[in-house]
Amino acid sequence: MSTAMEPNHAKRRKTQHSREGARKALGAVASSGGLSKSRAFILEADELLEEISLDYGAALEGVDDLLRRIKGSIEAIEPRESLPVTVAASKLEKKHRIRVPFPEPRPAESSNYKVAFAQPAQFNVVGSYVSKTMVKTQKDHSVDMVVVMPAELFQEKDYLDMRYFYKRAYYLAIIAVALQKDFGSDADLSYEYLNGNALCPIFSLRPKLLKDTEAAKEKEAAGLLNYRIRIIPCSPDAVFPKTKLRLGAALLRKGKEEDAEPSPFYNSTLAAEGCFLPYLRLLRQAEKKCAAFKSACILGRVWLQQRGFGGDLSEGGFGNFEWAVLLALLLQGGDSSGHATLSGSLSSTQLFKAMIQFLSVTNFAEKPCVLGAGSADLDSAIELGPVIYDSSRQLNIAFKMNPGSAAQIHQHAKWTRTLLNDTTADQFTPSFILKSDLALQNFDLVARLNFNDEFNGAVNSDCRGKIWGFSDKVYKVLRAALADKELGERARLIHIQNPRYPQWSLTENPSFHNSPVLEIGILFDSVNMARTVDRGPAAGPTAEEKEECDRFRAFWDEKAELRRFERDTIRETVIWNSVSAFDLCEEIMRYVFRLHLRVGHVDDEVTFFGDSFSSLLPFKPTDTSIYYEAKKAFSVFERDIRDLEDLPLHVRNVSPICPELRHASAKPPSLTPSKSGPRPMEAVISFEASGKWPESLVAIQRTKVAFLLMIASLLEKSKPGKIKAYVGLDDAKSEAENLSFLDVVYDSGAAFRLRIHSDLEEILLERQVKDKSLEQHVRTRTTALLATFRRQYTHLPLHGQSISTSATRFPALSPTIRLLKHWFNVHKLAYHFSEEFIELVVLNVFRSPYPWDAPSSASTGLLRALLFLARWDWRSEPLIVDTGGDMPMADRHAIGTRLEAWRKIDPNMNHTVLFVATTHDASGIAYTTIDGHAKPSKVVAARMTALAKSACRLVKEEGVELDPRRLFVPSLKDYDVLIKLNSKLTKSILKTYTTDDPVDGGGDSTGRSKFKNLDERTGQDALPLAQHPTETLLKQLNEVYAGPLVFFHGAAEDATIGAIWNPLMQKRGFRVNLPTSYRPVGKANDEDEGEEEEEDEEKDVVEVNREAIVAEIARIGADLIESIDVKRL
Amino acid sequence: MAPIPPTLGDFSVLPISIPPVPSFPRTTIHYVYVRRNAPKVPTANNSRSLFLTNVPVDSTELHLRGIFTALVGAGRFQSATFEDDRKGAESLADAQPAQVARLHAHHQTQLSSSTSSQKKRKRGEGEDAERAQEEAAARLPSTWTRPLHGSGGTAVVLLADEKSIEQVLKAIAKLHRTNKYPTWGDNVEQSAAAVPRLGSVWLKAHSRLSYPDRDALQAALDAFSTLFARKEQEAAAMAKRLRNEPDEDGFVTVTRGGRNAPASKNEAEEARKKMVEREEKRKEEDVSFYRFQRRERKKEEQADLLQRFEEDRKKVFAMRQQRGKFVPEA
């Protein structure tokens, strides 16, 4: 005996120890209250409580009266003498046409025990109605009334073989008969399962709302809810000995005493039947002891609800009741020594945080959580399901949970804890406001599995219905396949959503509306999920190893094979054929389903969702390696430059500044010769500080050109034949801007574009900006130049670094960025947004992923990025991306203040719209104000938000069946003018040669020889592409028509340019310098909105000559424009 | 639509018929507004030039010549200057060292205008032309065969003589009676030599011209460095002169530097920056030495906390104003 006790003791000590740790952590959480963000959290939570609190008087008017009437009519029921169970049921059905809602399996015809009805021992209203913890926003409002059945109806052995539940069902049917008689006309009556528990049918009564009467309307306006009253029969306390109902007992014997399996769910349901009133008392005590208890329960209810948890079996079996009881137990004496874990003087937010802390350190599915003094032997019970054991009432509160839901709530609590510890983030909104239970936003893979009726419950379904047995089995199989610790967990979370039982009418048997389907969600571990080889146990000679191998083989069956690995280890191995993480997961799931569930051999049994996202872009698994190759090519380039000996200045840095070199371009870089000229990847070079730069901006730019010419010839000399260098000219508008760049083309196909950083340039610009003696327009221009300079030479190199590092840290970052860029492209927004902005938005989703963890696939990443864009109120909130990870609070404050200042100066947001600050750039406008103009402008930013909102709406409405392509359908009907380009012709001018006649631009294709070998250009290297012709055209158009038109365009290859007329340019008075082409429309009197009032009462009025403008565009584009579709002039 | 008024203020309205093109098969009318050129600073030619506003964005001299030929016959049109061209001409003037520009400005405000204008006059027209030529040589090659003009832009057209102006204006007035508008692009040969074509050829030429010949580039750079060296010399000379020249109140401007040349402004800035940095560092170091300093700091922190609390309150209040911020999403 003592030896048997030994390990038990050890375990208990451990539990105690971990509880001690939890208590300390709780204390720490409770005492932290000094930080600004957490104070804001408290204020916001108080506001939330106030906002959602229910006005019971108005919302549930007449409930008490109704309850009294119900009680009256139940009390008036005549007692019925005992009859054999089946006889009584059929009699009831014949006479009142009401079915007795017997649980499955229904009592056998031959059953000889008897059922009866007698006056209830007690009535009581329980639940959130009495504890006043209902809120406005909960899904449905119900008032629970328990009817305690008298003890004399039951016999000692009724706890066995569902006899209690048969009696209870009959009792309920009798009540239903009576209530149908009294309330059938003015209320909707139905049966439903209590929390989806098929053992416990209950009676629901929903008062019919009187439509169209004055009184009803008034009441509705006052907030009257469409509530229902649930009548719950329950057993008197201690009618069955608690010891008989322990978790491991096998009470469903069916006559065979020996080999019956334990029925923990049945046992706990039976135990819970007697606990309604004890728990009511417990909650009352907690309310008395702790003033904030109620509010903490409401916060908990909101938190659970936003994450999709609820008391229903299908919602995870952890709802507000469990939350409240757990909290009450922690307040009362959570410890085994009887000490309270939480103090009653804590505030509601502190209690909430403490609960989150508790849930995040306790995984009910892994170790039994015992609350209260005394202990039961629960270590074996944990095998059967999650355990939260209330020792004083001897009930497992978590009996409705399953291992999956316990893991999920644990995970969510961990995420929320991280959020609550992150003092820099907005803690409130992700905790309570965001609805975070959408499958596609949560999980990287979602699958639907049809419930197979032929699946005979080889596993014990424990009275929860066949589907639960099935779902348990699915979970077990998936866990073994995807979350095995030995193999390296592929999945961080496996979630199975079971269908929910609907209410059913009194005259029918319960059934699902449709054929039941399990919804499976998998959260990837992005590194492990991409693994193609699973290394199992080593095949060794010892018995232990053999056993391991046998188990492995038993699970994986024919897929398992022996392989030799490095250092001569021989292991059991499973090899998979797919390449991407998603496909791997699908392959594995299909395989194990087929093997262990015998489903999936027909393809329609299981459907997978979420993959089509990656098929939207030509994502190839090889893309990652192309990015690495580009980086490698860049380092060769850097070395080549550093190796140049005759440079007058020492090279300090060569930094990449383009998306291709930070894993972030929508299309992977092309490193091989293609149809177009080489597309160089941009970089900047900086030299040691030198006093040799001339003290003039213009002269510095010229010196840079000379410098580039020098580098060009040196490079070509250093590797003759391998490198071609071309000095190109920027389309500079003034001589003080950067004038030129150097394109270096390697014979391997890689090409780079280099610009020179001069430190003196920045100093001169800074000085000019500060110089008050200069004219205002000069200073404005210089400010823009300085911003461009800083972006180009300071911010972009740092940005490149931070994105590159993050891309290695988060494998899903790069595909998410690319997918979001694609989204911006198809919606023709890309032209208005800098690529860096999009990258920062995605980075923010990964760095500050609350209420989740960082996304582990592109699909979740994209959906959450869209969610962010839809919710971001850029008018009043800055986007702060802490790229360095150590931004002090004071800096964040300063950034917020700066935004406020901007909005005060520029309330119409003409100059500054989006405000995005990073660790390196506190100005907030490095990537959103280009050349002194807001990029995007307010109109375009609003369009982005609108598009993101409609995308999110679609995601919500469609659920998992969403076809991702629908998120990527551009709506062309919104544009006033559509310019369609001739894409074939565009492609033909992607390549130019040095021998092309510069004036004629290479002439027509007719001028060229028909035969390739006679063409003088064969074998010649094409010039690099300075800029894509479409982009050049668009840039020209935008420069010319910045006033009247706003252009929309996506990627360079996009052959359609959209445009809308600027609504602000209306009819106006004529003056000399008009901003665009106007036509006269006659005279008008003073009422018009001309800017300059003239003394003349009659004014010449002109309006934008839109037709002529379109004609001009047609002339500029000439043969390049296929057609112009004008919808509105 | 109301009839087109023949004049707007002192401008004559010149309607131009735009022929349809395949991508936009409609005939449209563009309106150019014309008046006699009357610049603020009169030039030698302003009596025989016209001021045009709202010229089409793809205008070239040849296009305008075509229009004027249609109006008053051949031989009257001499040349056209576009607004953007004139702007471009100024840009190289900035090419002097920043410091010189400053000194120059300083100098000019101090000395009465008489001396400076005298100096200017001394230079003479011949020298100006020479300089212009030099600057043109120093300019980098253009990347466009045919630059576009800003929408609604202006141009100045020089005609043969003053009489032509009258005739043009009369012809425009007549247009409104006959409704026979001149057509855009008439009498213009669209070819490489005359007017470069737009569209794909134009864009391709731009791609090509973005990579100019290295020698041409080098030549432009050389021309620039000669120009710049001379300006630098002038600047040095002026700075030197300024050091010893009292202004009208008898003060001498003090400039940094040794006997030979004024110090580089750059160095001065840097020295100042260093000093400021040193100062700040020192301040930081002895901020918590005395008790009163610590006490004050504590007070400040408290005040700061209080202030932030207020801010939070305000924020929450502002959030409450926006409805729905505190309602959990469904």
Image (cartoon, coloured by chain):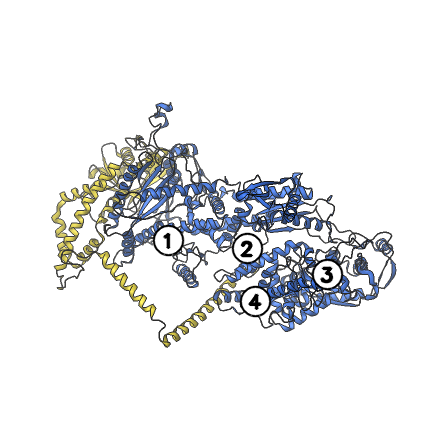
Chain colours: A blue, B yellow
Q: Helix or strand or loop: what does disc 3 sit on?
A: strand
Residue A797, given in percent of the width and then of the height, sits at: 37, 50
The 10 Å Cα crowd at callout 4, few under 14, some 14 to 19, many 20 or more, is: many
Disc on the earlier residue, 2 or 1: 2
Outermost residue toward the front in this view: A541
- The disc placed on residue A26 is 4
| Depth check, front residue: A479 or A49 | A479
User: Of callouts 3 and 2, which one flags the residue occurring earlier in the amino acid sequence?
Assistant: 3
**What secondary structure is marked by label 2?**
loop
Q: Is residue A1031 left or right of residue A818?
A: left
Mark closest to the chain's N terminus, 1 or 3: 3
Q: Which mark is residue A852?
A: 2
For mark 1, name the chain: A
Q: Are marks 4 and 3 on the same chain?
A: yes
- Give the distance between the C-alpha atoms of the residues marked 1 and 3, in whole angstroms: 72 Å
Give SS at disc 1.
loop
Q: Which residue is mark 3?
A: A230
- Front position among marks 4 and 1: 4
Q: Do labels 4 and 2 touch, CB within 8 Å?
A: no
Closer to the chain start, of discs 4 and 3, is 4
Report the quarter where the C terminus of chain A lies.
Answer: top left
The image quadrant of residue A411 is bottom right
For discs 1 and 3, the disc positioned in front in the rendered view: 3
Write down the chain letter for disc 2: A
Percent coordinates x, y for residue A171 in the rendering:
81, 60
Which residue is identified by label 1?
A1086
| Mark 4: amino acid | Leu
Circle 1: residue type = Asp
What kind of residue is marked 2?
Trp
